[in-house]
Image (spheres, grey):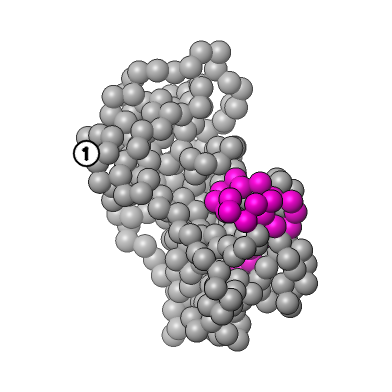
Amino acid sequence: MTYDFHGQWDKKTGHVAPLYFHEEDDIYYFNANYSIHYWIEQGADRRKLVMGMPLYGQSFTLADANENGLNAPSIGGGTAGQYTRASGFLAYYEICRNIQQNGWSVVYDATGAMGPYAYKGNQWVSYDDVAMIKKKSEFIRQLDLGGGMVWALDLDDFRNTCGQGESPLLTTIRKVLGPSRKGGPAMELPSSSKKEVKKPVVIDHKPSPKPVTGGKPIGGGSSLKTQEGDPCDEAFRPNDEDCSKYYQCLFGKYTSQQCPPGTVWNNVRQMSVNVFNQLLSVLIDFV
């Protein structure tokens, strides 16, 4: 259930289901990437992990209609949808209809870490669109997980009211994860693009007494040296000079970011990880 990371209970806006950590998020482990890797490193069989994707959005009523970005103060859930009739919750077909017919503005995340959000007046909603559902489905394939699941079937645009085809989100999932139209086996990724299945590593989330500085990046370093302000073509890059830092793509350029104390950047997992487990994973690779 990698959704409902944020909602009206936060008293401020946030995305319902980030794929990766976003620089404006308060909690670095509130995202699908961290959650899935945590289960794997605790020893879970990745083929038994089924990753959840939302076909709905978490909605908010803004405290100030002029403050409508991420982490904007809210006074409660958004106005109930015409059909779902629940405050703080909108089906995908209600969201796309608001955008197409009711003049809601859409904001896309420049880093690709999460899906879009939309707003109009004091109403605000975060959700996954077709592009993000496709990205998450490809993420499931690349990690060789057991599959994907949704909440819930009847929340997709099953009547094609928004012009993307019937059930566009479910259709996207089927195209990436499901069998072919002729009933053949599910689509396979080329062997070169599959992630290598490594032995599970135990994660210790106790903070290190001293922050980590210096050192070379480990865990999938880039062959290209990256500098602050370089044009970017991927969401993240390691810092070749300091493993406690990394570069994140923001508005088309790489920006230097600092890992939380006691962690270092792991480019394979696309997140900061505990120092002990990073070193242990390297040792396991050599065994």
**Mark 1 burial class by Cα count in 10 Å: few <14, some 14-19, many 20+:** few
- Quarter of image, res 181: bottom left
Give the amino acid type for the residue marked by disc 1 in the picture: Leu
Residue 41, x across and y down, in percent? 55, 38
Above or below residue 29? Residue 76 is: below
Query: Which structural element holds mark 1?
Result: loop
- Left or right, 39 with respect to 89, comes to left
Q: How many marks?
A: 1
Residue, x 25% and y 34% (percent of image)? 227
| Residue designated by label 1 | 224
Residue 50, x across and y down, in percent? 59, 57
Above or below residue 163? Residue 196 is: above
Above or below residue 262? Residue 71 is: below
Q: Does the stretch in magenta take in 63?
A: yes
Q: Nearer the viewer, residue 114 or 218?
A: 114
- Quarter of image, res 265: top left
Q: Does the stretch in magenta take in 156?
A: no
Image quarter where the C terminus lies is top left
Task: Mark yes or no: residue 124 visible.
Answer: yes
Residue, x 38% and y 28% (percent of image)? 245
Q: Nearer the viewer, residue 43 or 13?
A: 13
Find the magenta span and give its range. 55-77
Residue most extreme to the top: 209
Q: Nearer the viewer, residue 59 or 112?
A: 59
Residue, x 57% and y 85% (percent of image)? 161
